[in-house]
Image (cartoon, rainbow, N blue to C red):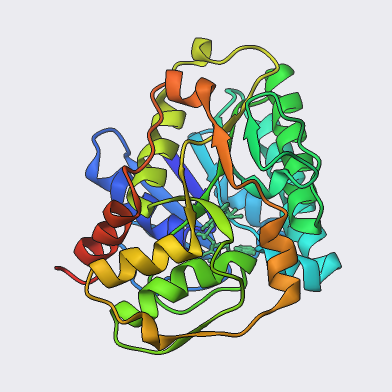
Amino acid sequence: MKTVITGGAGFLGCKLSEALLAQDGTSELVCVDQSKPAMPVTGVNYVQGDICEPGVLDTLIGEDTASLYHLAAVVSAQAEDDFDLGMRVNLDATHALLERCRSLPEPPRFIFASSVAAFGVAPPIVDDDTPARPLNSYGVEKVIGEYLVGEYARRGFVDGRCFRLPTIIIRPGVPNKAASSFASSILREPLLGQPTACPVAEDLAIWVQSPRKVIANLIHGHDLPADAWQDGLRVLNLPGITVTVGEMMAGLEKAGGDKGLVSWQHDAAIEAIVGSWPKGMITTRSTQLGFEADENIDAIIGVFLEDELGN
Ligand SMILES: NC(=O)c1ccc[n+]([C@@H]2O[C@H](COP(=O)([O-])OP(=O)(O)OC[C@H]3O[C@@H](n4cnc5c(N)ncnc54)[C@H](O)[C@@H]3O)[C@@H](O)[C@H]2O)c1
């Protein structure tokens, strides 16, 4: 059976492809993305296309599609800068994908990558029952996507599962247009001996997870049986850990990086977006369902050193 990943040439799409192909049972893996992958994964069928274009989804998703991981998105700062693009990709394409799935004879598993940006007006530490009241376009688009996936699941059109991802660090390569992009840069660049700028204060706290853990969690969430989900509760906050920028700097030094390479250049717009996200979460439901967090910031830095730098 076929698995489709939208945004499959992106950071998490590539990591997910590698992990799925390493497992038994994925007979065909199709990644659709408007961009080409920086490092193509052997065994993946890449389709370059815009999921907003009519026809692209019809060609990609058919009767043989058992699972769909919907990762394509316009990320936070870009969605804030370009309202129309964010609405088109994050909202309209999500709806179109769900409609395409609805037309299939068997409802596929539909995994939706949501975000802690779902929370805006919220206490610094949120729990499973904290309402999602986002404060920026990206967060609003993700929350509407969650509602749509939940409704299509209630109707039996898809077997939908939404996961609110922490900020994933350390992203390899070049910074992207996510407001949280600095959270990777301030570790990655110094570990590579390069200078970088930090737009937020040292006491800013973020809810984070490593790429390894989030991919394991997405696959775990896909593989859980349908009866693990209570009706109407198709959204989970994923476990993570809270780290301040200062703690990240301490972890950097411990790993042999030079924190002198980080210059402090305050950016009020970035701090406003990231500062509106939760600093931490009590993730009772996802923890009970077997989802996992990293141990600490040193473990997260260790994943980057091993997976990206081969140390
Ligand atoms: N990485 C994180 O820290 C994080 C945190 C929370 C949520 N998420 C969510 O996880 C998902 C994956 O994130 P990522 O970090 O891999 O992002 P990414 O930017 O690396 O990948 C997203 C991919 O989507 C593609 N894309 C965008 N618009 C498209 C379109 N119209 N048609 C086809 N492809 C399109 C992009 O080309 C890109 O390759 C996103 O939905 C993101 O919102 C990520």
Residue situated furthest left in the rendering = 311
Give left or right: position of 214 versus 110.
Answer: left
Instruction: Identify the residue at image location x=49%, y=50%.
Output: 5
Q: Quadrant of the C terminus?
A: bottom left
Question: In the picture, residue 179 is in which quadrant?
Answer: bottom right
Q: Quadrant of ligand 1?
A: bottom right
Using the rendered image of the protein, determine whether residue 171 is visible from the camera's viewpoint. no
Q: Residue furthest right?
A: 84
Residue 169 placed where, x, y %? 43, 60
| Residue drawn 50% across the image and 67% down it | 183
How far from the left and from the top, in percent, is residue 120? Answer: 76, 47
Residue 255 locus on image (x, y percent): 23, 68
Residue in the foreground of this view, choosing between 131 and 282 = 282
Closer to the camera, 122 or 231? 122
Residue 17 placed where, x, y %? Answer: 36, 52
Q: Nearer the viewer, residue 194 or 163?
A: 194
Q: Nearer the viewer, residue 275 or 150?
A: 275
Quick check: 151 above or below 192? above
Determine if residue 309 is in view: yes
Label count reads: 0
Side of 255 where 247 appears, left or right? right
Which quadrant holds the N terminus? top left
Residue shown at 67% from the left, 43% from the top: 124
Residue pictured at 24% horizontal, 59% vertical = 302
